[in-house]
Amino acid sequence: MSKKDAIIERSTKIFYKFGLNKISMDELADQIGISKKTIYNNFGSKENLIEQIIFSSMQGILEEISRVFLNDTVTIIEKIHLAIKKLYEHYTNLEIPTRVDPNAARIIFSPECVFINGQIKQIIQNLAVKAQDTGIIKKTINVELIPFVFLNSIRGLATWDTPDNLTFTKVELLKYSIDIILDGILTPDAMKEYLNSN
């Protein structure tokens, strides 16, 4: 593993714990046990490091979802369950910057990010088409919209600041929201099978 990749891997764990924008470069260097100069020599700025972390994280989720989709030893319902689990693990672990962040638009709409997002959407759409062809998703559902519905819901809830007076966690709300979406698109038998697989 290169020094750059090692910094990304170690920094990701720290950012998972503290949040992308809640830790300074001094704190980060101290936490991962290297000099701030080494980080700057490899990335130039905190924003560039965050960008690389997000790309690396997205690439990881793309690889995991691809493995789920290509796994012929599990049913389509199990694939849906596993793919969704991987997506919300990704989005709830990593605090993706919101559009209020001045660097967010540059990262989210960069060619690399758009390309990886496009691949993730295509995998979800392929799974949705297969599910509809086998009678798991209702025929009235436009499967082309399914990737956008899931990704926008997951991303929105993962980056939502939960009010202090709520009695449930962000992850609980995320799971419930996904169940509601699935209840709307899956056939009754498929929904029953999905709930039993959770």
Image (cartoon, helix red, strand yellow):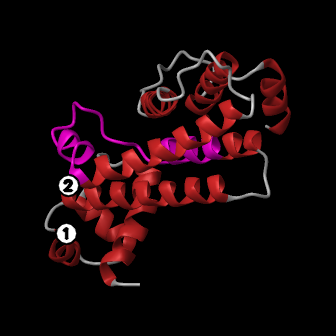
* Location of residue 163 in the rendering, given as x and y in whole percent from the top left corner: 47, 19
Q: Is residue 99 above or below residue 124?
A: above
What residue sits 29% from the left and 69% below the top?
29
Total marks shown come to 2
What residue sits 13% from the left and 67% below the top?
44
Q: Amino acid at mark 1?
A: Phe
Q: Amino acid at mark 2?
A: Glu
Q: Is residue 118 left or right of residue 21?
A: right
Q: Which residue is mark 2?
A: 47
Q: CA distance from mark 2 to mark 1?
A: 9 Å
* Location of residue 178 in the rendering, given as x and y in whole percent from the top left corner: 62, 27
- Residue 109 in the magenta stretch? The answer is yes
Question: In this orientation, which residue lies closer to the viewer: 155 or 164?
Answer: 155
Q: Is residue 79 left or right of residue 89?
A: right
Mark on residue 43?
Answer: 1
Rate crowding at label 1 as few (under 14), some (14 to 19) or many (20 or more) other CA atoms within 10 Å: some
* Location of residue 160 in the rendering, given as x and y in whole percent from the top left corner: 42, 27
Q: Which residues are drawn in magenta?
A: 83-111
The picture quadrant where one finds residue 192 is top right
The quarter in which the C terminus is drawn is top right
Residues at badges 2 and 1 in contact (C-beta under 8 Å)?
no
- Residue 186 in the magenta stretch? The answer is no
Q: Secondary structure at mark 1?
A: helix
Mark on residue 197?
Answer: none
What residue sits 44% from the left and 47% below the top?
94
